[in-house]
Amino acid sequence: MQLANIDIELVKKRIRNLHLSVLPPDGKVRIAAPMHISEDTIRLYAISKLSWIRQQQQKIRNQERESPREFLNKETHYFQGRKYLLRIFEVYEPARVILNNKHLDLYVKPNTDTLQRQYILHQWYRNEMKELIPAYIQKWEKIIPVKVNDFGIKRMKTKWGTCNIEAKRIWLNLELAKKPLHCLEYVIVHEMIHLLERRHNDRFTGYLNKWIPQWKSYRDELSSLPLIYDL
């Protein structure tokens, strides 16, 4: 669907309500609609949201982005909301990453290429997150009346987290390893609440207000942090 020079991806699903999203990194617009709603009705809905769509697209375009990473010495990388300078050490030993004051020290074998350096650092991020997440889940299971059966970590282009309600499994974006810890905790809580309420409706917002009243500042902080360049 095209509206006022804006391309809109329309997805029909077995859902109850219309859902409008403006997605990073380029402001793509997507509408998920119930199967029975006509295209004319969807078009009228989109027209009513044009101003909001343009505002969100402009916000995404203005958002700071990380420059492409080459995984070289003195390159800036993030971990838990802080900047670190990368230091490369070529050694004939197993690859490893060591956090060292203001530096991320990456130990690799000579001639390790960029993709392999990236993979090693991402695995380190993944392992660090795996150490943290269970404690947050256990903490919030004592507060939110749900049980998380499992969690996973993966790279995602448009979401910080998702929830498989049937399996009671939450998925978290690997990029959260770079963000402040309270942002990671907020996303975990957000996804756990989906086990009580599937949709982002008033009931869902009420739970957020009850259990993590500062959630809007955390959401806005995540929105303002640099987007990853190569996702």
Image (cartoon, grey):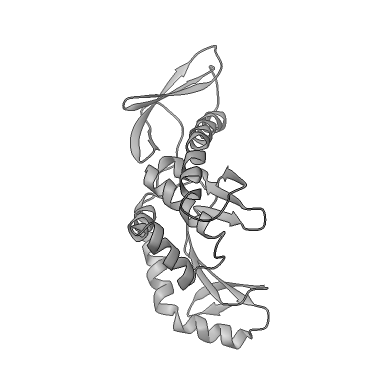
**Residue 4 vs residue 17: left or right?**
left
Q: Is residue 111 visible?
A: yes
Give the residue displayed 38% in from the left and 66% down from the top. Answer: 58
**x%, y% of residue 155?**
55, 46
Q: Is residue 60 visible?
A: no
- In the rendered view, would you say 7 is above or below 160? below
**Residue 78 vs residue 127: left or right?**
left
Q: Quadrant of the N terminus?
A: bottom right
- In the rendered view, would you say 122 is above or below 96? below
**x%, y% of residue 75?**
38, 32
Figure disc tally: 0
Give the residue displayed 55% in from the left and 62% down from the top. Answer: 196
- Residue 81, by quadrant, is top left
**x%, y% of residue 200?**
50, 68
**x%, y% of residue 207?**
44, 63
Q: Which is more toward the observer, 87 or 4? A: 87
Give the residue displayed 58% in from the left and 55% down from the top. Answer: 163
